[in-house]
Amino acid sequence: MSALRFAAIGLDHPHIFGQVTALNAAGAEFAAFHATLPEQAEGFARMFPQAKRVADEREILEDESIGIVTSASIPSDRAALAVRAMQHGKDVLMDKPGATTQAQIDELRRVQRETGRIFSVFFSERHESRATVKAAELVRGGAIGDVVQILGLGPHRANLAARPPWFFERERYGGILCDIASHQVDQFLWFAQAEDAEIVASLVANYAHPEHPGLEDYGEIHLRAGRTHGLARVDWYTPDGLSTWGDGRLFVLGTQGYVEVRKYCDLGGRTGENHLLLVDGVEMRRIDCAQAPLPFAPAFLADVRDRTETAMPQEHTYRVCEIAVQAQARAERLGYLAKEGS
């Protein structure tokens, strides 16, 4: 795996730092990067001095020694970049959302099947969260019986003054469900061990930012897969008093117990991240996840090497993208969105 070389194209979202770090830690060599804006490149180059900055993405796409392209470009641009990369023989690890329209997903499917490359999405709220990985191991192993309901909460701090213009343009960021809630869709399918899900209902709203008519600051998706029910709630309301950018949580209810993951902080007073609580027929306990492995990046590199699907099935990636896009497209529009007829 140490011989695998990768490059980054598109640094528009800071998630790119996590993607590069994960691939580096798993043994891949970071060879090059391309940034559209000089201010993006400066800090990135300081963090990853081993990578060469190139002036044109074609230098990366046409370099046969580079096998993987990772990106956190503007969301509406990601699918087209992934297509270009796959057509140049690269496997792709994209920031979420991997696509913002069904037409983009259809094209991704076509090109991925035509080229035989890997198209994957780095769902950081699962792939970078040790407690979430450990919870999935326990739940999928039967620790709480049959899964009945999955509740995923994705609150974020808006920090509007620091946001780029595309953040306020729905067609470019894809809408709040397509963007943020793709994390919760991914976790629903993964914990339910389901290949697909029905969208029962969805809604989006702008309740607090009338000065930004393109911004959706609240969203919900209700899902069902067989006997498993799900609710995703996402928002841009995290108050300044919270110690981190969002109190992301996951609750999984089973027929014989339940788990709660407090991903980034614990309002109960414990410091740090990755708090996992489990209640079953024997006891209630807090599980230390500090040393829990993060298997996604090593498995992804193994898939690149062996042409397998161990990190995340290809169809899972597509269905998460499709469910998020479809929930966004059919969502009821409330608050200032409804008032303005958007």
Image (spheres, rainbow, N blue to C red):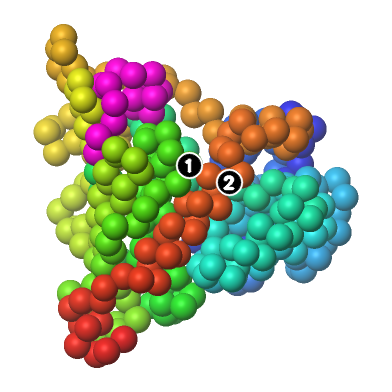
Residue at figure coordinates x 47%, y 52% from the top left: 320
- Res. 25 image quadrant: top right
x and y percentages locating residue 308 in the rendered image: 70, 33
Residue at the farthest top position: 282
**Position of 33 relative to 167 (above/below):** above
Residue at figure coordinates x 79%, y 55% from the top left: 114
Instruction: Report the residue marked by disc 1.
Output: 195
Marked residue nearer the N-terminal end (2 or 1): 1
x and y percentages locating residue 290 in the rendered image: 37, 23
The amino acid on which the numbered mark 1 sits, given as a three-letter code, is Glu
Q: Residues within 10 Å of mark 1 (few under 14, many from 20)?
A: few
- Res. 161 image quadrant: bottom left
- In which quadrant is the N terminus drawn? top right
- Judge by depth and name the residue closer to the eye, 131 or 340: 340
Query: Looking at the image, can residue 50 be seen?
Result: no
Q: Is residue 49 left or right of residue 240?
A: right
Q: Are marks 2 and 1 in contact (CB under 8 Å)?
A: yes
- In which quadrant is the C terminus drawn? bottom left
**Position of 99 relative to 48 (above/below):** below
Dot label at residue 220: none
Q: Is residue 145 magenta?
A: yes
Dot label at residue 315: 2
**Position of 309 relative to 245 (above/below):** above
- Res. 134 image quadrant: top left
x and y percentages locating residue 331 in the rendered image: 31, 70
Q: Find the magenta span and give its range.
A: 135-149
Q: Is residue 279 magenta?
A: no
The amino acid on which the numbered mark 2 sits, given as a three-letter code, is Glu
Residue at figure coordinates x 45%, y 64% from the top left: 325
